[in-house]
Image (spheres, grey):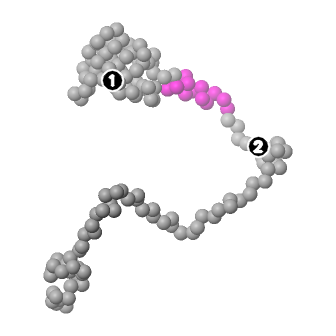
C-alpha cells in the first residue's frame, strides 16, 4: 500500500488500484470500516505505521484489553436452588395459556415465486421426441424406434 499525504491528518492510500481516503482527526475512512466496526482497517494502519503514530489511540475502547478484562470483573454466581427463589405475586398470578394455533404435521408446502407480467404472456415450450421428432412423447416412450432387449 502506498500512503500519500493530502493535508494535515488526511491521507490517500493506494491499494489494489483504488484510492482510499483516511481522515485521522475525524477517525473516518472511505472504506467505512471504522464507522461500522470501530476497528482499524488496513488502510488506516498503513498510514499510522508510516507516520509512526500509536494505533491504540485510533481504535475503539471496546477492543482494548482493559475493557475486555473489565467484563469479567463482576463475578457471576450460579442460581440458588429453585425452592429459595423469591417470585413476586403478580408473576405467580399470571396464567400462561397454550397457543391457539397448532402447526400442522409434516413438511411445510413450498411457496411459488410471484409471477411477473412477462410470465403471463410466455408461450409454453412443447417437448418433442429426439428420435422421431414428434410431440407428445419422449425418446424413452417412442414407439417408432425399435428396441433390442
Q: Callout 2 environment at 10 Å: few (<14), some (14 to 19), or many (20+)?
A: few
The foreground one among 76 and 105 is 105
Relative to residue 52, is residue 145 drawn left or right? left
Q: Quadrant of residue 132?
A: bottom left
The segment highlighted magenta reads: 62-75
Q: In the image, which disc is placed on residue 43?
A: 1
Q: Check the picture and name the quadrant holding the C terminus.
A: bottom left
Q: Are marks 2 and 1 in contact (CB under 8 Å)?
A: no
Indicate the quadrant where residue 77 lies: top right
Q: Is residue 68 magenta?
A: yes
Tell whether 135 sits left or right of 53.
left
Q: State the image coordinates of residue 120 (x, y, percent, origin top left).
A: 33, 62
Tag in front: 2 or 1: 1
Helix, strand or loop at disc 1?
A: helix
Q: Residue at x 84, y 45 (%)?
A: 89
Residue 110 location in percent, x, y? 45, 64
Local crowd size for mark 1, using a 10 Å CA cut-off: few (<14), some (14–19), many (≥20): many
Residue depicted at 39% across the width and 15% down the height: 24
Residue 131, compared with residue 46, is above or below; it is: below
Q: Does residue 136 appear in the picture of this structure?
A: yes
Q: Secondary structure at mark 2?
A: loop
Please report whichever mark, 2 or 1, sits nearer to the chain's N-terminal start: 1
To which residue does mark 2 refer? 80
Amino acid at each position: 500500500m502506498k500512503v500519500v499525504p493530502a493535508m494535515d491528518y488526511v491521507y490517500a492510500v493506494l491499494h489494489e488500484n483504488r484510492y482510499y481516503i483516511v481522515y485521522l482527526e475525524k477517525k473516518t475512512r472511505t472504506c467505512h470500516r471504522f464507522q461500522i466496526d470501530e476497528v482499524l482497517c488496513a488502510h488506516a494502519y498503513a498510514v499510522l505505521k508510516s507516520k509512526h503514530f500509536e494505533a491504540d489511540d485510533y481504535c475503539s475502547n471496546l477492543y482494548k484489553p482493559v475493557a475486555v478484562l473489565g467484563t469479567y470483573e463482576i463475578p457471576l454466581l450460579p442460581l440458588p436452588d429453585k425452592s429459595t427463589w423469591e417470585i413476586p405475586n403478580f408473576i405467580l398470578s399470571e396464567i400462561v395459556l397454550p397457543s391457539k394455533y397448532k402447526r400442522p404435521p409434516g413438511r411445510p408446502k413450498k411457496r411459488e415465486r410471484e409471477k411477473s407480467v412477462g410470465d403471463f404472456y410466455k408461450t409454453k415450450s412443447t417437448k418433442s421426441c429426439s428420435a422421431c421428432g414428434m410431440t407428445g412423447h419422449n425418446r424413452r416412450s417412442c414407439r417408432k424406434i425399435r428396441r433390442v432387449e
